[in-house]
Image: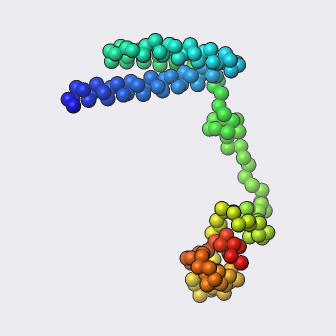
Amino acid sequence: MSVATATYLVRRAAQKERVRILYRRALKDTLNWAVHRHLFYEDADLLRARFETNKHVEDPDTIDRMIADGEVQYNKWRHPDPYIVPWAPGGSKFTRNPAPPEGYITMAEKIMTKNLFFSHAKIKIEVIYDCSSNQSQHPLCVIQKQVKADSGHCRGSHFSVLCILFFL
């Protein structure tokens, strides 16, 4: 492949990408302007037809000029207050969750205190007790040693509450 051909292909790929991005932005912005969905469908069909009419243009300079004109026209007609999904960045609910109150019991604490496990649970909570140290007389370490001896599961110096509850 010659350098000229490679340059042409790279330029065409960049143009296709710019056209795709322009079309998607314009389509999303059309949805912002439409009051009802059936009006959006009509506007989307007209927008698609405008892009389809210039589909077969081959001259790269003409294509660049048409893309630039389309981007200018899109920026001119952008919606001043576009719809943003409430929980997305910039939405009305984004980062509105308050901090949990003091004394809030985490899921790990609930599990450890109430033993709310079923055999199909997929939650794995690492416990901080290091049973390989000399202070391995903690009740959870003793249980871990028994579980290791009985089933061979829960390997490692740290163990999970999940393994203990499943194999007791």
Identify the residue at horizontal 62%, vertical 14% (top origin). Answer: 42
Quadrant in which the C terminus is drawn: bottom right
Colouring scheme applied when the structure was drawn: rainbow
Residue 46 at x, y = what percent? 56, 13
- Quadrant position of residue 8: top left
Q: Nearer the viewer, residue 106 or 142?
A: 142
For the question of whether residue 161 can be seen, the reply is: no
In the image, residue 150 above or below residue 123: below
For the question of whether residue 42 can be seen, the reply is: yes
Q: Nearer the viewer, residue 128 or 10?
A: 10
Residue 45 at x, y = what percent? 57, 16
Identify the residue at horizontal 68%, vertical 17% (top origin). Answer: 38
Identify the residue at horizontal 27%, vertical 27% (top origin). Answer: 7
Quadrant in which the N terminus is drawn: top left
Residue 53 at x, y = what percent? 46, 12
Residue 52 at x, y = what percent? 47, 15
- Quadrant position of residue 117: bottom right
In the image, residue 138 above or below residue 57: below
Instruction: Indicate left or right for 70 with 98 as reference.
Output: left
